Amino acid sequence: MKIFVANLVKLGLTILILFPVTLKAQTEQDALMMGKQRLCVAGSYAYNSWEEYWEGTFKRNNDNIGKLSTQTGMLMLNYGISNDLNIMASLPYMSTKATRGTLSGLHGFQDFSVFVKWRPLKKQFGNQTVALLGVAGYSAPTNDYNIDFMPMTVGLGSKVLSGRLIADYKYKKIFATISAAYMHRGNVEIDRPAYYTDRQINSSMVKMPDAGNFQLRTGYRTSHNIAELFIDNMTSFGGFDIRKNDMPFVSNEMNSTRLGIEGKHYLNNLPSLGFHANVWTTVSGRNVGKATGFLAGIDYIIDFNSSKAK
Amino acid sequence: MKKIITYSLVGLFILVMSCNKDIIESNSDYPELAPATQDINGGDWKPFIVSSSAGFAMPAPEAVNSSSYQEELKELKTLSSNITSEQRKIIDYWKVGSVLRWNEIMRQLVAKHNVPPYQNEDGTYPVPSAANPFSYPEFPFSNPPYAARAYAYLSLAQYDALIHAWKYKTQYNRPAPYKTDPSIEVSVTKNELPSYPSEDAVVSGASFELMKLLFPADIDYIKEMAEQEKTYRLWSGANVKSDLAAGDSLGRWVARQVIQRAKTDGMGVAGGNPAIWTKLEADCIAKGETPWISLETPKRPPMLPLFGNVKPLLFDPAIIASLRPGPPPSATSPQMRKELDEVLDFTSNPTKERMRIVNFWADGVATYTPVGHWNAIASDDFVNMQLSEIRWARNYALLNSSLMDAAIICWNTKYFYFNARPCQLDPRIKTLTGVPNFPAYISGHSTFSAAAATILGYLAPERSADYTMMATEASNSRMYGGIHYRADCEVGLQTGQKIGNLAIDRAKTDGSN
């Protein structure tokens, strides 16, 4: 495990060096804002895989799956309505594959998401800056992709309404961001008329547990560079455990804690172009795969305001 | 501005939290049992297993004017008045119909236990033990053959017990308590059926006795439901205690006769042993064919290889060879290549509609199995037919004897030919549902579905064409999912239909028409 973490850090640093870190290409999870009338177009590629997974709290592997990998290509747009109000949208295309066993991989577009990010407060006290942000989000499946063939499915098929609060503190170039989100998940409909959770339910509708996301990001941040460490926790408020050797199901209680590093860099001589990358691993979980993954992306900023003086 | 946003955020949060996400189940609005006829001649119908109740000492009921009966009425009056909302919920649950509710309970327990055991450290698999049902792996693993047999014996026990109950009902002709004392508060629709013995207690007793053997780890739940059903009859003012006691004893007695039959039907040895598993493979190779191998890692022993020798309900075991279809296409034949290509095409180019069909009919791990699925389909139709309890039981008995016999002939065929699954012969085939751990030919889904569709088409003729369409879809779903060839499916449908027809032959002469 120690060696693994050491390798992970090494790999992360390598990525940071290869893609001299970016940012301004913000996600709904960070404390960064796109400036007024600026549009960021971001494309990313992500890969994650797992060989071990948890059935409830029982950690196991499965030679009928081998390694299950997921690849994601994502397009994201972020537009600055004002310096303190951004709107962002994203659409991922995903594909899954198992290295062993007979189960077929699946692929397709997943959920379209829209977020409105608002920064009502940003105050500077000498070397220190404090900001508070709120993010409201909505995401919905772009198509009725198969959700009843886990773990090969590309998503859970649920419409999600989310609200996130973010607090950001910066001292010189060192920062910490904490955020918490509540995700209200809509019920989903599966293709069969009955299913068993911890009891038989005679319906094709499945009650989805809401979930929370908690995150801490901390590291180094300037206008051109970010290097950060993050810890991310997803917790389902409800749902049920996969029993021993049972199949996973959309409304399982899926919890995970991930640890990762992330970097962003905007070029000095071409500041509208940036790169971002991260690498992460799952340190604990319940009814999920013990996944490790990375992401690499490129951002381009179009300034509709460029004629004006900055 | 800040205030407005704060308030709207709080408002949004409250709105979101208050969204009702509760699921309304398809069986939650079933109407109260309201038989068009009580089938009062039901005592003359032909039982499946327990042909006579002469061995059962049914006590004659006390007369309605006896002091003991008057005491019972008095007690009933207290129990059935001032019903709480909790009691009302229980009454509303059971008044939909006893046989139907036990069928649902069975489906739930089958789904609960339909999970294959996890392997041992050394790559072997533990076998669930009825003697030790609570320790892992919990007994039973209610896979499709186990389930088919379980549904069948439950239905048969209920049906046979109700035939004997109806006979006593007409013999003793004790009127319902509310006929004798009109001041009793009654929470169910009144009817003309004699109340001794209570049909609910008969079904509850028979179901309890059978299900505690089939699902011993759930004895507490089964007992609770059985007791609850009898109590419901008191709360609803529909039976006195002596009606219930007589019914309960009769139901249990009939179930015990059915259990005697079940214990000697061959299920006990259906799992086979390593020598038998090896011989199946060797016999197949000796015929020049490619034997089935488990596609699981570690390799799992084949599922119930001798289930095909279990004693059938609708036909003489001697004719099994005449019911068993001819061989599948040889593994290396051009016909097999053609069928493999068809499956490969389905799995390489899955459409949403085909994946929907695969999922709808998958009925795999943690489900009530295809047998339960057809029971669910049947139940949704039976509720609209205004059946008496005894006819409900007859319909399920005919359906589930067909399904058990379909399982027998299907398993017999599978292990007679022992042929490989598509992805064994062509590893390029990746499946859209789990690959069952037994040979391919003939498809279980197809055999089950055609048997069910055939007998259901007889019982509910106006739905006959729909059932046939459903059976075809269920059959095709296994090709779409990549786990069966066309031959498995088509011949499975034909074989299942033969079994369904045997059930129709029986239904025509069982005295109920």
Image (cartoon, coloured by chain):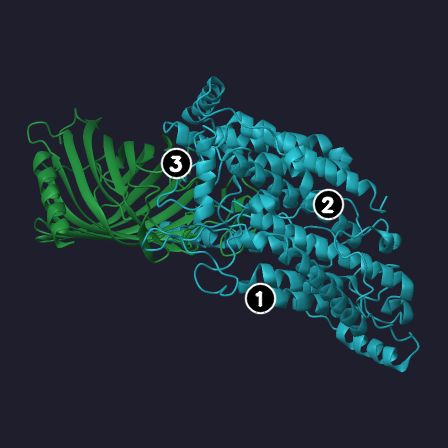
Which chain is the one coloured green?
Answer: A
C-alpha span from label 2 to label 1: 27 Å
- Disc 1: host chain: B
Dot 1 corresponds to which residue? B219
Q: Position of residue B165 (x, y in %)?
A: 81, 61
Question: Neighbour class for label 3 at 10 Å: few (<14), some, many (≥20)?
Answer: many
Seen at 24% across and 36% down, the residue is A46
Q: Quadrant of residue B411?
A: top right
Dot 3 corresponds to which residue? A103
- Disc 3: host chain: A
C-alpha span from label 2 to label 3: 37 Å
Q: Position of residue B39 (x, y in %)?
A: 86, 52
Mark in the foreground, 2 or 3 = 2
Q: Earlier in the sequence, mark 2 or mark 1?
A: 1
Q: Tag 2, which secondary structure?
A: helix
Does residue B24 show up?
no
Badge 1 amino acid: Ile
Which chain is the one coloured cyan?
Answer: B
Residue B193 position (above or below residue B16): below
Question: Neighbour class for label 1 at 10 Å: few (<14), some, many (≥20)?
Answer: some
Nearest the camera: A22 or B301?
B301
Seen at 81% across and 56% down, the residue is B163
Q: Position of residue A221 (x, y in %)?
A: 11, 45
Residue A110 position (above or below residue B211): above
Q: Position of residue A88 (x, y in %)?
A: 30, 36
Dot 2 corresponds to which residue? B398
Badge 3 amino acid: Leu
C-alpha span from label 1 to label 3: 36 Å
Badge 2 amino acid: Leu
Mark in the foreground, 2 or 1 = 2
Residue B320 position (above or below residue A251): above
User: As drawn, is B426 to the left or to the right of B386?
Assistant: left
